[in-house]
Image (cartoon, rainbow, N blue to C red):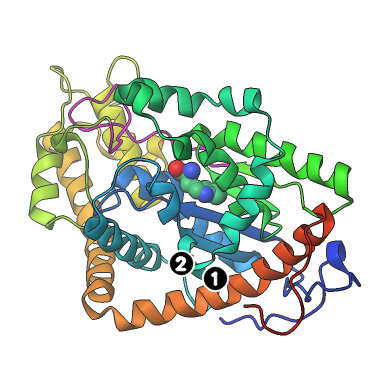
């Protein structure tokens, strides 16, 4: 239910002149963002990340959002980006992020992120940024010299996303670990140089529910960039398309259902998916399939995906269709986010020695 936020100031900015009170509740703060780079979440995103954010909103002051500015680090079609931003927000809600409990917002609606990012970029060593492996991978993967400066400074913007809310915990996948380390470094560096300002956040690395693999190539992970359409379950696709993909999932030539990632990666993946969706431990599933065949296992996976996916899809498509409700949720989220973010930027600007604008007229 809606947890009324009290106005007790966070210890960090208590009594600081000029800074508006932080509306942190007594609970630790969690923050994470998704990039709007696909029309639909896939099952790997959902099980590996989003689903873990949902319970955190009950014991945290939660901030979840759509990182549209990060999406711009590679070329986007403008119309499609807008669509995908809305679709991503809708899917957060469909996955169970509750606007009554969490602040749901769009990154570009809170311009303070980019303001803080500039300050942080001036604290980031070129060499340190240059060691980010994700940048190197992405730049190597086709972009080469065409990689943008934005792609290079992407981790600094991510640090700003996190530090501007003084988030305590950041649930992310293993691939974001290095970016979290940079964030922690920048927080500590700023605090050291200018006095305690930022919370040094803890990564909350989501131990992917066992890893969800590509259905058509179960040695690789289910991933938008790596998987072929046949290997990836997009949650907003027609259920019958997904059922077909599950039924055609690659298994192996024997008939035994057991969990063996090395010898039987396809079967292991189906068991992992079924276990994650049903909450039944893999061993129990294996016992229950004794004497049965791959067709039975695939049927059970298809049913489980249809059940979770059906409700998800209906809710998400409803929100996308209606749109006004979604826009209202994002507007309210941005308002709450900006309250906090603007106070932090004011404090940071002051600390680093930027001249405040003359009273009265500024926005
Ligand atoms: N870089 C993250 C990803 O690609 C998305 C992201 C942007 C993010 N800003 C963030 C995640 C802040 C956590 C916190 O998955």
Q: Main secondary structure of the magenta part?
A: loop
Please state the horizontal and vertical placement of residue 270, each as a whole percent of the image: 26, 36
Task: Say which quadrant the C terminus sits in.
Answer: bottom right
Q: Are marks 2 and 1 in contact (CB under 8 Å)?
A: yes
Residue 223 part of the magenta segment: yes
Please state the horizontal and vertical placement of residue 330, each as a whole percent of the image: 44, 74
Residue 56 part of the magenta segment: no
Please state the horizontal and vertical placement of residue 356, each as a whole percent of the image: 77, 68
User: Which of pointers 2 and 1 lies earlier in the amino acid sequence?
Assistant: 2
Q: Residue at x 61, y 57 (%)?
A: 115
For the magenta stretch, what is the residue range?
205-225
Please state the horizontal and vertical placement of residue 296, each as a whole percent of the image: 15, 40
Q: Is residue 211 above or below residue 220?
A: below
Q: Residues within 10 Å of mark 2 (few under 14, many from 20)?
A: many
Q: Residues within 10 Å of mark 1 (few under 14, many from 20)?
A: many
Figure disc tally? 2
Q: 90 and 96: which one is in front?
A: 90
Q: Is mark 1 within 8 Å of ligand 1?
A: no
Task: Say which quadrant the N terminus sits in.
Answer: bottom right
Q: Is mark 2 within 8 Å of ligand 1?
A: no
Q: Residue at x 87, y 65 (%)?
A: 11
Which label is found at residue 102?
1
């Amino acid at each position: 239910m809606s947890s009324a936020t009290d106005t007790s100031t966070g210890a960090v900015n208590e009594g600081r002149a000029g800074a508006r009170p932080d509306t942190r509740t007594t609970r630790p703060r969690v923050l994470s963002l998704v990039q709007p780079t696909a029309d639909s979440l896939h099952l790997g995103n959902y099980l590996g990340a989003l689903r873990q954010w949902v319970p955190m909103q009950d014991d945290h002051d939660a901030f979840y959002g759509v990182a549209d500015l990060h999406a711009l680090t590679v070329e986007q079609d403008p119309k499609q980006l807008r669509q995908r931003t809305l679709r991503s927000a809708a899917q957060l809600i469909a996955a169970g992020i509750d606007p009554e409990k969490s602040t749901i917002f769009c990154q570009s609606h809170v311009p303070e992120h980019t303001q803080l990012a500039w300050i942080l970029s001036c604290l980031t060593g070129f060499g340190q940024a240059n060691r980010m492996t994700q940048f190197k991978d992405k730049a190597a993967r086709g972009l080469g010299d065409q990689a943008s400066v934005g792609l290079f400074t992407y981790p600094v913007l991510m640090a700003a996303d996190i530090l501007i809310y003084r988030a305590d915990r950041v649930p992310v996948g293993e691939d974001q670990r290095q970016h979290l380390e940079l964030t922690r470094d920048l927080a500590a560096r700023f605090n050291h140089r200018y006095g305690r300002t930022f919370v040094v956040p803890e990564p909350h690395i989501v131990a992917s529910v066992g890893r969800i693999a590509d259905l058509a190539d179960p040695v690789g992970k289910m991933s938008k960039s790596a998987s072929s359409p046949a290997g990836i379950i997009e949650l907003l696709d027609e259920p019958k398309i997904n059922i077909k993909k599950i039924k055609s999932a690659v298994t192996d030539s024997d008939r035994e259902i057991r969990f063996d990632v090395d010898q039987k990666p396809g079967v292991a993946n189906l068991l992992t998916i079924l276990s994650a969706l049903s909450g039944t431990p893999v061993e129990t599933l294996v016992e229950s399939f004794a004497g049965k065949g791959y067709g039975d296992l695939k049927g059970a996976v298809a049913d489980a995906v249809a059940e979770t996916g059906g409700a998800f899809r209906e809710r998400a498509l409803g929100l996308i269709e209606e749109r006004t409700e979604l826009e209202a949720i994002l507007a309210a989220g941005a308002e709450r986010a900006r309250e906090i973010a603007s106070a932090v930027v004011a404090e940071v600007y002051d600390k680093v020695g930027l001249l405040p604008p003359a009273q009265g007229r500024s926005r």
